Image (spheres, grey):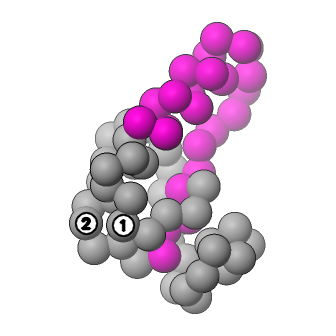
Amino acid sequence: MPCLNEAETVETCVRKTIGFFEENGIDGEVVIADNGSTDGSQQLAREAGARVVPVVDKGYGNALMG
């Protein structure tokens, strides 16, 4: 999931996705591609169970490629 200052929603999105995986027997992980958030999004995502990958180049497309 691309992310830039999503503190209000990232934790909920990660938890819902992990819950979906568990309910449906899917072996997977949630990866957050962070474009330099300054609002604590990275930590919230990690605490919710996601792997956070920093992506230096700005933009939605770069986050997805990262």
Position of 40 with respect to 58 (left or right) is left
For mark 1, what is the residue? 5
34 vs 62: above or below: above
Residue placed at 48% from the left, 76% from the top? 35
Q: Amino acid at mark 2?
A: Asp
In this view, the residue farthest toward the bottom is 57
- Identify which residue, 46 or 36, lies in the foreground: 36
Q: N-terminal of the two: label 1 or label 2?
A: 1
Q: Amino acid at mark 1?
A: Asn
User: Which SS class for mark 1?
Assistant: loop
User: Which SS class for mark 2?
Assistant: loop
What is the span of residues highlighted in magenta in the rendered image? 12-35
For mark 2, what is the residue? 39
Label at residue 19: none
Q: CA distance from mark 1 to mark 2?
A: 5 Å
Residue placed at 58% from the left, 32% from the top? 17
Q: Position of residue 28 (x, y in %)?
A: 69, 33
User: Tags 1 and 2 in contact by the CB under 8 Å rule?
Assistant: yes
Residue 57 visible within the image: yes
Q: Residues within 10 Å of mark 2 (few under 14, many from 20)?
A: few
Residue 3 magenta-highlighted: no
Q: Position of residue 42 (x, y in %)?
A: 36, 59
Q: Quadrant of residue 66?
A: bottom right
Residue placed at 72% from the left, 13% from the top? 24
Q: Position of residue 14 (x, y in %)?
A: 49, 39
In this view, the residue farthest toward the left is 39
Residue placed at 64% from the left, 11% from the top? 23
Position of 19 with respect to 4 (left or right) is right
Number of residue marks = 2
Position of 47 with respect to 31 (left or right) is left
